[in-house]
Image (tube, grey):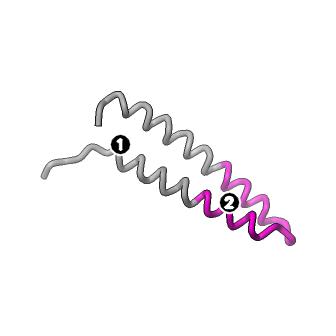
Amino acid sequence: MENSDIPSLGTQLLVLQTEHRMLDTEIARLAEFPYVDQLQLQRLKRQKLQLKQNIERIKAQLIPDLDA
């Protein structure tokens, strides 16, 4: 990995974290209503999980490999 990749990964990380927080807020808002569209709620939760997995993948790329 080149040093020029690190800022772009950091930027991607911030964007994904922001989207994750927005989805969390939206899911909480929808869950407050008793007759919420359960399919929509499931889709949002699945999207949130995918974002979390992408966040973890980028965090792992940002940690330098240590030769033991």
User: Around disc 1, counting alpha carbons within 10 Å, would you say few (fewer than 14), some (14 to 19), or many (20 or more)?
Assistant: some
User: Which is closer to the viewer, label 1 or label 2?
Assistant: 2
Q: Residue 55 location, x and y as percent?
A: 48, 50
Residue farthest to the top? Answer: 4
Residue 34 sits above or below residue 24 on the image: below
Q: Is residue 16 magenta?
A: no
- Determine the secondary structure under disc 1: helix
Magenta segment's dominant SS is helix
| 2 left or right of 21 in image | left
Amino acid at pointer 2 = Leu
Q: Which residue is mark 1?
A: 62
Which residue range is magenta in the image? 22-48
Q: Residue 57 location, x and y as percent?
A: 41, 52
**Residue shown at 42% from the left, 31% from the top:** 7
**Residue shown at 62% from the left, 46% from the top:** 19
**Residue shown at 23% from the left, 47% from the top:** 65
| 40 left or right of 60 in image | right
Amino acid at pointer 1 = Leu
Residue 66 sits above or below residue 31 on the image: above
| 37 left or right of 25 in image | right
Q: Is residue 36 magenta?
A: yes
Residue 44: image tag:
2
Q: Earlier in the sequence, mark 1 or mark 2?
A: 2
Disc 1 to disc 2, how far (Cα)? 27 Å
Q: Residue 29 location, x and y as percent?
A: 78, 58
| 51 left or right of 37 in image | left
Q: Residue 10 location, x and y as percent?
A: 45, 36
Residue 42: image tag:
none
